[in-house]
Amino acid sequence: MGKYFLVVFSILMAVCLFVSPASAYRITLVGEVNDNQQLVADNEIYDIDSNAVGDDLVLNFIAQKVKVVGQLKVVQQSDESDGSKIITVESFEVVGE
């Protein structure tokens, strides 16, 4: 019984080490792209991660209202700050005012 418990416990610990916490999740935001390569939505600032879709967004749609779907990551910088919010853009569309 003790040997079985030790084997199961070891396997569970190994799985826990290799599984990363869910630090990113899909979100939809509507906001405006500023000239600092950021999305401003609901009075929050989101840094736009560099990928093909995100680069297209920040280079060609500055000062336009857009609907963005992507993976949100919050990077904690220190205990006192809320951290920076980074969105990896999967898709976007320009929306009217």
Image (spheres, grey):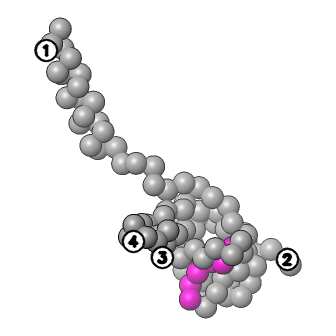
Reply yes or no: does residue 40 show up in magenta.
yes
**Which residue corresponds to mark 1?**
3
Magenta stretch bounds? 36-41
Query: For this rendering, which residue is in front, 92 or 71?
Result: 71
Residue type pointed to by label 1: Lys
Residue type pointed to by label 4: Gln
In this rendering, the label closer to the viewer, 1 or 3: 1
Query: Which comes before the other along the chain, label 2 or label 1?
Result: 1
Report the residue at 27% width, 43% height from top: 17
Q: Residue lying furthest left in this view?
A: 3
Query: Which comes before the other along the chain, label 3 or label 2?
Result: 3
Is there a contact, CB below 8 Å, between mark 3 and mark 4?
no
**Which residue corresponds to mark 2?**
96
**Which residue corresponds to mark 4?**
77
Inspect this view and state whether residue 89 appears. yes
For label 2, count other residues whose C-alpha is less than 10 Å away and answer few (under 14), some (14-19) or many (20+): few
Reply yes or no: does residue 8 show up in magenta.
no
Q: CA gap, disc 1 to disc 3? A: 49 Å
Main secondary structure found in the magenta portion: strand
**Which residue corresponds to mark 3?**
50
